[in-house]
Amino acid sequence: MEYFLILSPLVLYFLATLLYLTRLLVNRPVLGFVGLRLVVLGAGLQIAQFAHRAWVLGQLPLLEFFDFFRLAALLLAVIFVGLCVFKKYYATAPLFVVSIDILYLFSLTYQNSFPLTGHNSGGAYLFIHIGSLFLTMVAFWVVLITAILYLVAENKIHKKEFSGWMAKLPSLSELESLNDTMTTLAFILLTLVIVTGAGYAKITQGHYLTMDFKQWGAVVVWGYFACMTNFRQRLGLFGHRGAVWALCGSVAMGVVFAAGF
Amino acid sequence: MTTLNYAVLGMNHKTAPVALREKFSLSAQAIPDFLRRLMSHNGLAESVVLSTCNRFELYTALKPGASFDGVLEGTLGSENLPEEHFYRCQDREAVSHLFRVTASLDSLVLGENQIAGQVKQAYQLAQEQKTIGPYLNRLFPRALHVAKRIKTETEVGKRQVSVGSVAVQLAKKIFGDLSKKSVVLLGAGKVGELVWQHLAPHCDANRVTVINRSRDRAARMVADQAVRIADFKDLDEILLTTDILMTSLSTTLTDHDAAWFAKLMQKRGNEPLLLIDLGMPRNLLPGVGKLPDVYLYNVDDLQTVAAQNQNLRQSEIQRAQGIISEETELFFTRREQAIVLPTIAGLNRKFEEIRCRELKKSLAKLGHLSASDCDAIDRLTQSIVNKALHDPILMLRTDKESREGQFLSSFKRMFRLGEDEDEYQ
């Protein structure tokens, strides 16, 4: 029963992915229509499961990596549904649903707990660190998606292709604006992640900055995004160049994040 | 039971000139009176009038043997109807026509949204005037449903097929909202003027600059006081803050090559720049379009996109036609099935009465049976009746021949089912 509950949102997300990928090949809007509803259903099921665990069983989310990735998948699903409902970004679906699937699949792989209690807990630092890390990852994921979409759309415009999927993508300006917003948000959250991570390292290992790759890597990526967000005008990081920078930065962040495992 | 025929009498932008369409055009205030006068004709059982700037159509349910002859003349008080400008169709053709009109396949601008609202309004007006009954009440909601289905399932009307509208589509694909973007029109050629007519409604005149040798010609082209007119020597400076540059000169700007534009882009902080080259010979060198964030389209490019869209639109129209044929067929099948519904209901009612009567008699004699035994017998008799009636009912519903008048009346006589009420008799 437990596995059924865990896997049921994933099955719905998978079905939605299949429909959206088929939609890329076949011009049948009904596929997208059903796909979006499956994502909504999957997200609803996840929310119900988390609510049940919190209120009935008294277990807070984010206690395990397991929750971490599932919550990330849920948040990405909510962002995607929001973009579809309020901005009609239906064409962004393939990248979003595949990302949701990947995050959900990760949740099945890592099931070890965070040491939130006991001598290795690091007080409130670890809790805030994990919370902000989770949000940072989702924000960077959206940065990655919008950067890819920008480059794809730009390439299609250069090639004078306006049919199929391209015809439904948001304008370059809208994609760039969403990318900028999410980059700024991700940068602020990353700052919080680094500060709380350093505080946790001081308590548990005696130093703010250790020789841990993910700590150094995060600082380097932070510097990269600090340049990008603060010197955007001077460096001319708009349009194509801005999308490439955002793409490289979010991939680098992914590498640093993966090193944490 | 009397069966009415769906019929349409009308004219539109394809069959009649505007001068004639004007004569028949009715305002929303005039339609109620027109409908009342129309309904005084004996042949018409139900009517809806659709009057827009491009069409005048009369949708009716005609009584058997009735025709449109003299209907419009009598209603409008005119002597002769210009027959050559009117079209008439009946039954499947009429239903299919309404579906086409509502889905905007018959409109001047293919795929426009206004017509579905106008059809709905015409239907509501007829409802208020009580000039419609079961026939048109079934047809019009179905037409609105078909229009919605075509809009959702196809992309009719979503493809731009003129060079000007493709240019607008392209600009929107890059910048989204064009009202905050600055536009420069370099040269005031004929093609440029045509494209500008499409672009102008989307742009803010205060952000538009025209550069042309003849200032008078430039002023005539834009015909808007808010538009700024500048000299050619200011071009380089203006381009620093321009989003869309549309050129229609008769010479190539050889000094504005890729290297020059690369420097310009650097100065602009790589803000995207759309270049629409409508000149002949081409005003901008092809290498310019290879720069990142510079989107160069010439007339050929725009025409190619327009031609691709035209092909795609054709295939979408075919899909929409397929939906209309399918829905028309479905509409008539349901209508035919609806004819037998009273007979089926009567048959069920009659057998249920017999079952209840006989069951009551038998149970009265079997007083020793328990309540559960009585229930079992009740279920048994229900099951026998359902199974016995299954095949004849299925045949009535699905077999086309069995729904025809002669068979249906024989069937009713066979089971002594009463005649249905006919509100048009």
Image: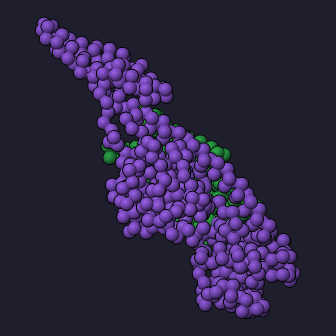
Residue at 52 percent across and 62 percent down: it is B80
Asked whether B227 or A41 is in front, the reply is B227
In this image, B360 relative to A33: left or right? left
Residue at 71 percent across and 88 percent down: it is B218
Numbered marks: total: 0
B408 vs B235: above or below: above
Q: Position of residue A102 (x, y in %)?
A: 58, 46
A118 vs A236: above or below: above
Residue at 21 percent across and 14 percent down: it is B358
In this image, B51 relative to B375: left or right? right
Of the 4 image quadrants, the one containing the C terminus of chain B is: top left
| Chain letter, colour green in render | A
Q: Could one spot residue A197 in this view of the protein?
A: no
Q: Could one spot residue A161 in this view of the protein?
A: yes
Of the 4 image quadrants, the one containing the N terminus of chain B is: top left
Residue at 71 percent across and 54 percent down: it is B311
Asked whether A140 or A142 is in front, the reply is A142
- How has the structure been colored for display? by chain
Asked whether A175 or A224 is in front, the reply is A175
Q: Position of residue A103 (x, y in %)?
A: 55, 47
Q: Position of residue B252 (x, y in %)?
A: 86, 80
B341 vs B152: above or below: above
Say which colour chain B has. Answer: purple
In this image, B378 relative to A185: left or right? left
Q: Position of residue A83 (x, y in %)?
A: 51, 59
In this image, A75 relative to B216: left or right? left
